[in-house]
């Protein structure tokens, strides 16, 4: 039996500790031009080289050497430093979960299975103490999604230095998310259902999912013909999907799931993004031919089969890229996202080039989110969302993020971890 007083005291202490954390104030809008001098510029769209980058009114105004500067331009010497586009973390629940074990701090899912009308951005907590810790590793943007049973809702791209969800939203309705029914048959003494019953349950779930899409399509056709007398918010939210404007993000790992998702996307002429994709390397040529993107979430994964090599999960991004599949890397969750930059560095030791690893967190990630005209590379006219590292941003030892700008606004890189470090450092200084 739990002692209620003890539990209550622990909860109060926990939430009191949370209130001690103070997030940095979001940056002010850029007031005057800023020249970033002498940095090694990793533009993504061209090879790294030492250049100057001019930021004006939140945009990249010029790149090169001996640039003509507007009057009143501030200058920041970044000699020996590395300048990157702000990194983009796709597929996570940052700002939706504060403490995983405390239900009251979670707003990441709905209990029903049919929520295509759910807009995840309205649940985004811009004051989350987790966000600054992610930002400190170079991430300026995050694609958040709602979890759930089947049709889970629509994802949104957020920048990570906002006052509230309205301020932080970069693009709403990035994709319609679907958790594809499991196709694997479990075995073992702990499995209660027989193989036949498992297959029956799988077929039931698959049929239900297809029926949901058919219902939505009938509603869409009736809406186009002006025959709908009322409005069903669920199917109305899928209008853009059937019109080919809203990509389908299917969370699937097994080849059977992926093939079924490809058939559904083909049926409705939708752009398909596979999320998870643990076994996507097995279908790499098919995915490339169908122009299916993959957000790969297992860069640290262990073998899933007895006959797989120990490093199969590590090699998968390189295998997909070699086949011509556009790949973004992700660590699904919220806390884990801070280690995503190191996961990208990890897979470069297993076949993926450093250039492609950088693309997977910048330009390719931006393209999958539909914002590659604004973000993902250092090019004139794009958002001045940039990050400076003292060394290679993918290297555990060289990585040290020193500066960040989002839309030209200087971001304070302090966070709860650094605050605690400074606090307890005083204990040893006072001894």
Image (spheres, rainbow, N blue to C red):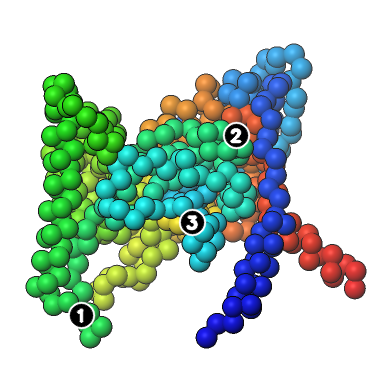
250 on left or right of 342 = left
* Quarter that holds the C terminus: bottom right
Residue 376 x, y percent position in the rendering: 48, 35
* Res 370 quadrant in image: top left
In the image, 274 versus 3, the foreground residue is: 3
Height in image: 417 above or below 385? below
In the image, 112 versus 381, the foreground residue is: 112
Residue 100 x, y percent position in the rendering: 50, 63
Crowd tier of the residue under label 1, counting other residues whose Cα lies within 10 Å: few below 14, some 14–19, many 20 or above: few
What is the C-alpha distance between the residues marked 3 and 2? 27 Å
Lower position in the chain sequence, tag 3 or tag 1: 3
Q: Residue at x 10, y 66 (%)?
A: 200
What label does residue 106 carry, if any? 3
Tag nearer the camera, 3 or 2: 3
What is the C-alpha distance between the residues marked 3 and 1? 31 Å
Q: Which residue is mark 2?
A: 406
Looking at the rendered structure, the number of numbered marks drawn on it comes to 3
Lower position in the chain sequence, tag 1 or tag 2: 1
What label does residue 192 carry, if any? 1
Q: Is residue 101 visible?
A: yes
Q: Residue at x 37, y 35 (%)?
A: 173
Secondary structure, mark 3, is: loop
Secondary structure, mark 1, is: loop
Q: Is residue 402 visible?
A: no
Whether tag 1 and tag 2 are in contact, CB under 8 A, the answer is no
Height in image: 235 above or below 177? above
Residue 22 x, y percent position in the rendering: 71, 50
227 on left or right of 402 = left
Height in image: 388 above or below 398? above
Q: Of all residues shown, which one is farthest toward the right?
A: 430
Q: Residue at x 59, y 20 (%)?
A: 61
What label does residue 266 carry, if any? none
């Amino acid at each position: 039996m739990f002692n209620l007083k003890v539990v209550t005291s622990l909860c109060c202490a926990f939430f009191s500790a949370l209130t001690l954390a103070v997030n940095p104030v979001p940056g002010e809008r850029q007031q005057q031009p800023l020249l970033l001098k002498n940095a090694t510029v990793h533009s993504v769209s061209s090879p790294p080289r030492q250049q100057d980058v001019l930021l004006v009114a939140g945009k990249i105004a010029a790149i090169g050497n001996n640039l003509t500067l507007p009057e009143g331009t501030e200058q920041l010497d970044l000699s020996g430093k590395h300048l990157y586009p702000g990194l983009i973390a796709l597929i996570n629940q940052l700002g939706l979960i504060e403490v995983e074990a405390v239900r009251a701090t979670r707003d990441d899912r709905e209990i029903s299975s049919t929520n295509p009308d759910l807009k995840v951005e309205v649940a985004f907590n811009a004051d989350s103490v987790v966000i600054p810790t992610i930002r400190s590793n170079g991430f300026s943007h995050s694609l958040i999604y709602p979890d759930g049973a089947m049709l889970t809702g629509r994802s949104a791209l957020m920048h990570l230095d906002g006052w509230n969800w309205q301020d932080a939203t970069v693009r709403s309705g990035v994709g319609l998310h679907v958790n594809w029914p499991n196709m694997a048959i479990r075995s073992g003494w702990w499995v209660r259902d027989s193989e036949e019953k498992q297959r029956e349950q799988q077929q039931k779930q698959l049929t239900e999912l297809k029926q949901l899409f058919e219902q939505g399509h009938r509603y869409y056709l009736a809406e186009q013909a002006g025959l709908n007398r009322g409005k069903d918010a669920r199917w109305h939210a899928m209008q853009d999907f059937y019109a080919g404007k809203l990509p389908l993000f299917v969370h699937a790992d097994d080849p059977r799931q992926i093939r079924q998702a490809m058939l559904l996307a083909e049926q409705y002429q939708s752009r398909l993004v596979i999320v998870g994709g643990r076994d996507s390397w097995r279908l790499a040529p098919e995915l490339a031919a169908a122009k299916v993107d993959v957000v790969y979430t297992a860069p640290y994964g262990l073998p899933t089969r007895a006959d797989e090599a120990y490093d199969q999960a590590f090699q998968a991004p390189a295998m997909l890229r070699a086949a011509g599949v556009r790949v973004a890397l992700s660590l699904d969750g919220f806390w884990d996202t801070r280690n995503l930059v190191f996961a990208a560095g990890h897979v470069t030791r297993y076949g993926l080039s450093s250039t492609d690893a950088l693309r997977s967190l910048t330009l390719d990630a931006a393209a999958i989110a539909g914002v590659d005209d604004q973000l993902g590379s250092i090019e004139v006219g794009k958002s001045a969302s940039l990050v400076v590292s003292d060394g290679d941003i993918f290297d555990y030892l060289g990585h040290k993020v020193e500066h960040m700008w989002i839309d030209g606004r200087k971001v304070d890189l302090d966070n709860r971890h650094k605050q605690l470090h400074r606090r307890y450092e005083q204990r040893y200084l006072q001894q």
